[in-house]
Image (cartoon, grey):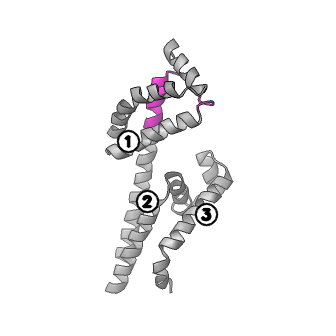
Amino acid sequence: MNLFELNTLRRIKQGDVKEFEKLFRKYYPVLCMFTRKYVNDMDSAEEIVQDLFYKLWKDRESIDVKTSLKAYLFQSVKNKALKVIDHNAVKQKHAAYVKQDLESTSVDNSDSIEVTELSEAITRTLNQLPERCREIFILSRFDGLKYHEIAEKLSISIKTVEANMGKALQLFRSSLKPFDNLAS
């Protein structure tokens, strides 16, 4: 890391907002363009880069940059973009599973419509969850991981997993209430 980057990082770690804003203005556009190459969507790319800068500021005192600040920023958004791609693959896998399940189930036409509506409601609800909450829910319900396994995999506490699952289940209960009659 060069002297300029060391000074920039030191000032940001000390809480210098102006230095952080300079770093943001310098790298935000190029990081967005770089990230878009991975996720093929500018809105998702911007969200990833914004999240990076948010976490950089929030965790500024404990950030440990080994190479250069520029390399750190680019590697961070690349890693996050790859996680988003993996998450989208899980969503597509779930959609394909639901579609296959619907096609293999022999139900009359009105039941088929209700099941399709239920599937759409599940997908909508899943997409309404905050990213971390959605990730935890998918790991638990679709991948079958236990809470302690999720906590270990995501480097978070079990209490965080429990709290996020509680939020997810509460949202699912309220969103899927109109479909209670399908269970009987």
Q: Position of residue 123 (x, y in %)?
A: 42, 65
Residue neighbourhood size for the residue with mark 2, other residues' Cα within 10 Å, grouped as few (<14), some (14–19), many (≥20):
few
Q: Position of residue 2 (x, y in %)?
A: 50, 14
Q: Secondary structure at mark 3?
A: helix
Is 89 left, or right, of 53 in this rendering? left
Give the residue type at disc 3: Gly
Q: Residue at x 34, y 80 (%)?
A: 113
Give the residue type at disc 2: Asn
Residue 75 lies in magenta, yes or no?
yes
Q: Nearer the viewer, residue 150 or 71?
A: 71
29 shown above or below 183: above
Q: Are marks 2 and 1 in contact (CB under 8 Å)?
A: no
The residues tagged by marks 2 and 1 sit, at their Cα atoms, a distance apart of 17 Å
Residue receiving disc 3? 166
Give the residue type at disc 1: Ala
Mark 3 or mark 1: name the one nearer the start of the chain: 1
Mark 2 or mark 3: name the one nearer the start of the chain: 2
Q: Position of residue 4 (x, y in %)?
A: 49, 14
Is 171 left, or right, of 146 in this rendering? left
Q: Residue at x 46, y 79 (%)?
A: 178
The residues tagged by marks 2 and 3 sit, at their Cα atoms, a distance apart of 16 Å
Q: Position of residue 171 (x, y in %)?
A: 52, 67
Residue receiving disc 2? 127
83 shown above or below 111: above
Q: Residue 45: give its label.
A: 1
Q: Secondary structure at mark 1?
A: helix
Mark yes or no: residue 146 visible: no
The residues tagged by marks 3 and 1 sit, at their Cα atoms, a distance apart of 29 Å
Q: Residue 58: give its label.
A: none
Magenta residues (range): 60-78
Q: How many marks?
A: 3
